[in-house]
Image (cartoon, rainbow, N blue to C red):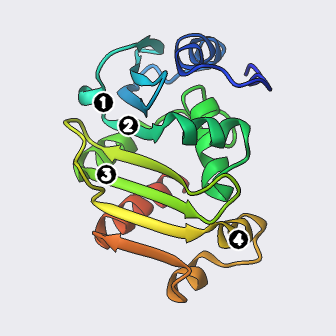
Amino acid sequence: MPELSSDPLSPKEFMEVFIPTALAEATLDAETDVKLGVKLEGEGGGEWVVHLSGGEFKVDATERDVAAFTLVQTVEDWRGGLWEGRGGVFGEQAKVLLTQGGAGSEDAPPPNAKVMEQLQALGGLIQATVTGGEGGDWSIGFKLGPGALPDEPTTHIKIEAADAEALQSGSLDPMQAFMSGKIQVIGDMALMMQMQAIAMSAGN
């Protein structure tokens, strides 16, 4: 797995040079056939589709409408999560997903076809926002299923930066955080719970 440069890359270089290099060293499941999208909004951004099929891959700079699962972020927040340590535990998870998720590792195995089918069937846009952190609020979105992005998130999860750090260190229990209102869920809570259930079943 190639190391991510300590100097920020452009979105184009990251998606069209770093990601193909990472995938070239990966062992991909020959039965996997899935299209993963990335949409980065703002100056220098764009849309890409990573197609994993038959043990091979292809990265295309094209509209992500066909993707079963799409990561959606502003260029500023994408850069902040990868190189500036923003986003707390959410930023760390996004970094693992972006740098290792497609290639496969102990932390992020390659996409499971059954899991991707289940996520794709849910539909909707889940957005997570970490508020009050250094550098301002930080957000990341996950579009489930193909098609256009909705104008507003189906489910919006909000948490303060200090609480995100506590989750990351283990000093704050996720269920306790949710029950005490430190994790706020706005919109379709069922969608978040369904996504969480699928993710948990994939880890078993």
Look at the numbered disc 3 and give the secondary structure of its residue: strand
Of the residues under marks 2 and 4, which one precedes in the sequence? 2
Is 87 on the left or on the right of 46, as rendered?
Answer: right
Percent x, y of residue 146: 23, 36
Residue 125 circle label: 3
Of circles 3 and 1, which is in front? 3
Residue shown at 43%/11% (left/top)?
Answer: 58
Look at the numbered disc 4 and give the secondary structure of its residue: helix
Is 7 on the left or on the right of 79, as rendered?
Answer: right
Q: Amino acid at mark 2?
A: Thr
Of the residues under marks 3 and 1, which one precedes in the sequence? 1
User: Which is nearer the eye, 201 or 144?
Assistant: 144
Q: Is residue 41 at all visible to an observer of this figure?
A: yes
Separation of marks 3 and 4 at Cα, in angstroms: 25 Å
Residue of label 1: 67
Look at the numbered disc 2 and give the secondary structure of its residue: strand
Separation of marks 4 and 1 at Cα, in angstroms: 34 Å
Asked if the residue under mark 4 is in contact with the one under mark 2, i.e. CB atoms within 8 Å, the reply is no
Of circles 2 and 4, which is in front? 4
